[in-house]
Image: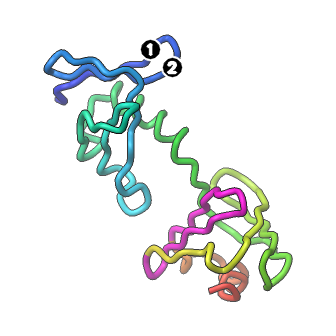
Amino acid sequence: MPDFQLKRNPFGRLVFAGADGKVHDGVVPVHAFPITAPAEGFALVTADGHEVVWIDRLGDLPDDTRILLEEELAQREFMPEIRHIHRVSSFATPSVWEVETDRGHTAFVLKGEDDIRRLSPSTLLIADSYGIHFLIRDMHTLDKTSRKLLDRFL
């Protein structure tokens, strides 16, 4: 059982109440390793950036607290996962990519090859021209057409 309570105020902001009786309004969860450890390593920080508690694993929390944190993280960590690359407008950049993600069909502009970052031998992070990050969790699981298009930029 954690030694704190977490709830939402009437404005939808998270309110942290510690075991010491201190209350912090407007705390936000910060995920240390959102891609490599999606259910581990979280801090709750105040509006001025001070950590009030470290959470090793979401699964260790009571359901109501875990659900609050998952909702908040879903809003903050918008990172669609690319499942299929339908089309690329050009193999020179900038180029328009039409992709299928875990959140549906979309298109984005890749400004340059430098906007594709390798996080591990098989995991890629692609930033579009607006700064939205798209994740390819394992490029080896993509279909042949998608891999062929992707290889032109790697």
Front one among 32 and 135? 32
Residue furthest toward the right? 89
Q: Vertical placement of 53 versus 147: above or below?
A: above
Q: Nearer the viewer, residue 142 or 135?
A: 135
| Residue 20 placement (x, y as % from top left) | 14, 20
In-front residue for pair 79/111? 111
Q: Residue furthest front?
A: 48
Residue neighbourhood size for the residue with mark 2, other residues' Cα within 10 Å, grouped as few (<14), some (14–19), many (≥20): few
Q: Amino acid at mark 1?
A: Asn
Q: Is residue 59 left or right of residue 91?
A: left
Q: Distance from label 1 to label 2 (Cα)?
A: 5 Å
Within the magenta stretch, is there residue 17?
no
| Quarter of the image with the C terminus in it | bottom right
- Asked whether the residues under the numbered discs 1 and 2 touch, taking CB atoms below 8 Å apart as contact, a structural biologist would say yes
In the drawing, what numbered circle is on residue 12?
Answer: 2
Query: Percent from the top left, x then y, of residue 101?
Result: 67, 59
Residue 112, given in percent of the width and then of the height, sits at 70, 77
Q: Reply above or below: 136 against 153.
A: above
State the extent of the magenta-drawn residues as a range. 120-137
Residue plotted at (78% across, 71% down): 86
Question: Which residue was labeled with disc 1?
Answer: 9
User: In the rendered view, does 81 fall on the left or right side of 110?
Assistant: left
The quarter of the displayed image where residue 153 is located: bottom right
Place residue 42 in its image quadrant: top left
Is residue 46 positioned above or below 114 on the image? above
Q: Residue at x 47, y 22 (%)?
A: 13
Tag 2 secondary structure: loop
From the viewer's perspective, tell me whether residue 152 is left or right of residue 126. Answer: right
Which residue is found at the position 77% from the left and 57% from the top?
106
**Element carrying mark 1:** loop
> Residue 63, percent across and down?
33, 29
Is residue 122 one of those drawn in magenta? yes
